[in-house]
Image (cartoon, grey):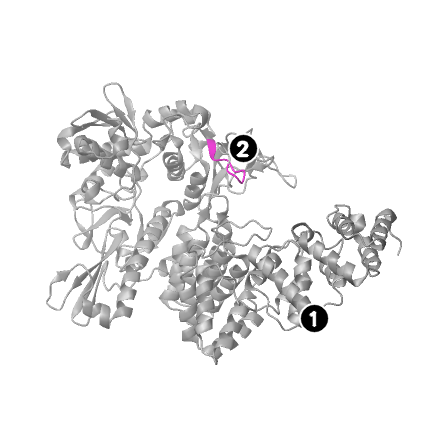
Amino acid sequence: MLSRYPERVAAVRRLAAESDVYGLAGQLLDVAISNDNSWEGDGAEILHTLRVLPEGTARLLADELIERTEVFHRTSPSRINALGLVTLLRRGLPDDRLAAERQERLAHYGAMHSVWSTHEVKTLVRAELDAGRSVPGPVVATLRRSAVQQYHPDKELKKLLQELTDPVLNPGEAWSDRAIADLAETGEEARPYWRALLLQAASATSAKPTGKWDKATMALIDRIGAGAVRERITCWLGLVGLPRTQPFADDGYYHHDDAYDPYNADALRGLAWTLSLLPADRDTTRTLGRVVEVSLRKVPGLGPRNPKVANACVVALARTEGEAALAELARLATRLTYKGTLKVLNSGLDQRAKALGLTREEIEELAVPAYGLTEVGRSVHQLGDAAAELLVRGSKATLTWTNAAGKTVKSPPATVRRDHPDELKELKAAVKDIDKMLGAQAERLDRQFLARRTWAYDKWRAQYLDHPLLGTLARRLLWTVDGQPVGYADGELRTLTDEPVTAGMQVELWHPIHHGPDGIVAWRDWLERHGITQPFKQAHREVYLLTDAERNTGTYSNRFAAHILRQHQFNSLAALRGWHAKLRLSVDDEYPPAYKELPQWGLRAEYWIEGIGDDWGADLTDSGSYLRVRTDQVRFYPIDAPHNSAHAGGGEYRMWLRGGAEPVDALPLADIPPLALSEVLRDVDLFVGVASVGNDPTWQDGGPEGRFQEYWTSYGFGELNAGAETRRALLTRLIPRLAIAGRCTVEGRFLHVRGERHTYKIHLGSGNILRTPNDQYVCIVPKGTSAAGDPAAGGYLPFEGDRVLSVILSKAMLLAKDKEITDPTILSQL
């Protein structure tokens, strides 16, 4: 052939004729590491030239090239076939010597956990397989990851990997290590089928299983036994998400320590699908739900750990028949915020609803299980001579034990642990399930105001008021029956004057916006008189009425503008409340505002925001997303109006028009139904109240370069928002009942606490503290707060979920006895 660079070939020929081993080695390496693609065609001619070398010189040259392996084996195989070159130069060596060299090279790759020249390794592996030899497990694992992560499929590599079935999974993860160990301990008769099942699971590379995949998997399940398959896979999936047992290999790709092995992720997907082919039980669906949440757990610098696995578990739950799977889907629907997985989940629930001829809301209501409760919030389980009472108090479930002598004990008697381990395990799991489901259902009910949900009385009574689990929430809320406000007390629905209500036609949730101040206060008194703690703010719910300023602006509200929010926390809160908030990156791109669609009202609400800063580390994450955003207007549009957008780093929002669409003006706020306006503004107030940097007690220096000092001070000690005003009114009633009542007074924006060392002012909006008389800031970072309603948080509270209220009460109790404080960080400020 004719070389395009004859001078290089001539140099190789001259050096070969002179038997200059060192010169040849350098020349060959120069060719191999050249970035000039025109050298691709010269490899064959160079190899042909080297055939004239005497055997001794060839072997010396091969040895020299091997000595320079750190450079040589990282070169592009498209220029010179490294293995072919060394093998040629080693001609005349016995086969066992060549095989030993191949093993040495593969062992080197396994030890280094590195495959820089995939082409060379493929050649080495092919030679080993042809010789009937094994390939080191780390090399197999690295090649598998390489195949999964390649942008362009390598058909040769994928074909080779079909023959590399040992180890059956990549080690290094707790669940895969356990599966490999279980396979090794399996009897010889069943082991091939288990091995085939794991390989079948690893072949799950599509978004959903095919009929062919299901058929092949069922054949293996029939060979092994459905019960054994369910038990083992459930055990393995229970270990998903635990810390890695060994670090990732350095294979040229970036792997976060908390990421899943990409090859094992396919196997996890297949195992989840396998469970969906089996008769469901609660342990299985519980495990699938846990894997969904673990796989979507966000990791700094990575994002969700593995949405692919989460989606597969949702698909598995959607394919699984039975109440338990439906309940898990309904619970996840209220907890998930990752849009891709939420879309898969919503599709599954919608298909279930369509198949049963029900609405989406009805299917979610039917999906709530009783978890063994035989009456509202209670059940008794007899286990031999002992008994367990499962009781729901507020939003927490507890187990109380009675031994054979009828005495109440704190833990399960020894006879229960010995004779009834399975029942005990299920009871403990039920307690955890109830806690999770109650939180999810409280969130769902809190969103029903905007859904404009109504129920027929009899159906509502069965599905809510008298439901063993939902009844514990419904009986702590206020309702309207045929327009008559009612609450549940002393075994009956009752009016404000405690008259029983036993029948009706239509039921809906009570909302304070439909009632005057006197009526709202009267129902608050009624709840307090009956000792009812609501699962979320209802009677004490903030109402946001149109202000004069908003009437003047007409189409937008500036009530929650000019705040600085932590973007990632804001996005998570927005997703939980049904808003769409795209994570802003510091790039030259357009982003929509945070928005929420209100289909029952035909509206779309928008909250305008922009990214802040361009300093990596101080303002941006490693991935380039803004750490903080600045807030602006709240607007309303018809739900089908074109979307607005603005540059990621700020600028004017403008309507994105396509196909000749005309711009649509924002709707006048005066035309927005009061309940819709109030609930949207309440959401926005929540975002600000939780995600504002003004809530961070460690930001007294104003954050990066002190840029936010003015904002932090104005928010942390400024005027109270609607939520804080509600908190102020509640504390005014609550303080006189506390043990520290003589040391506390509510004045203006602060709760004043008289300690033994100093007097303190706790801001009712942020929970920040000033020490009198010179208003010196005192930083106390709460390590954890008692749940609202817990006596530890100050006795009876009329609602759950106000974390700031719990923080204020805990700080007040601490500072009232400031001479008993032992924390050196706090003492240094006092």
Residue at horizontal 49%, vertical 41%? Answer: 581
Compared with residue 161, is residue 2 higher up or lower down, i.e. above or below?
above
Q: Nearer the viewer, residue 182 or 510?
A: 182
Which percent across, then down, holds residue 2? 89, 54
Q: Quadrant of the C terminus?
A: top left
Q: Is 573 within the magenta?
A: no
Q: Nearer the viewer, residue 338 or 23?
A: 23
Task: Report helix, strand or loop for mark 1.
Answer: helix
Q: Which mark is residue 123?
A: none
Name the residue tied to disc 2: 665
Magenta span covers which residues? 621-630
Q: Which mark is residue 95?
A: 1
Compared with residue 261, is residue 212 higher up or lower down, i.e. above or below?
below
Which percent across, then down, holds residue 591? 55, 37
Which percent across, then down, holds residue 255? 53, 50
Q: Residue furthest top?
A: 774
> What's the distance in space between the residues labelled 2 and 1, CA to CA?
81 Å
Is residue 317 something one can see in this rendering? no
Q: Is 629 within the magenta?
A: yes
* Badge 1 density bin: few <14, some 14–19, many ≥20, Cα 10 Å: few
Q: Quadrant of residue 746?
A: top left
Q: Nearer the viewer, residue 480 or 103?
A: 103
| Residue 41 as seen in the image, left or right of residue 559 | right
Amino acid type indicated by mark 2: Asp
| Residue 531 as seen in the image, left or right of residue 601 | left
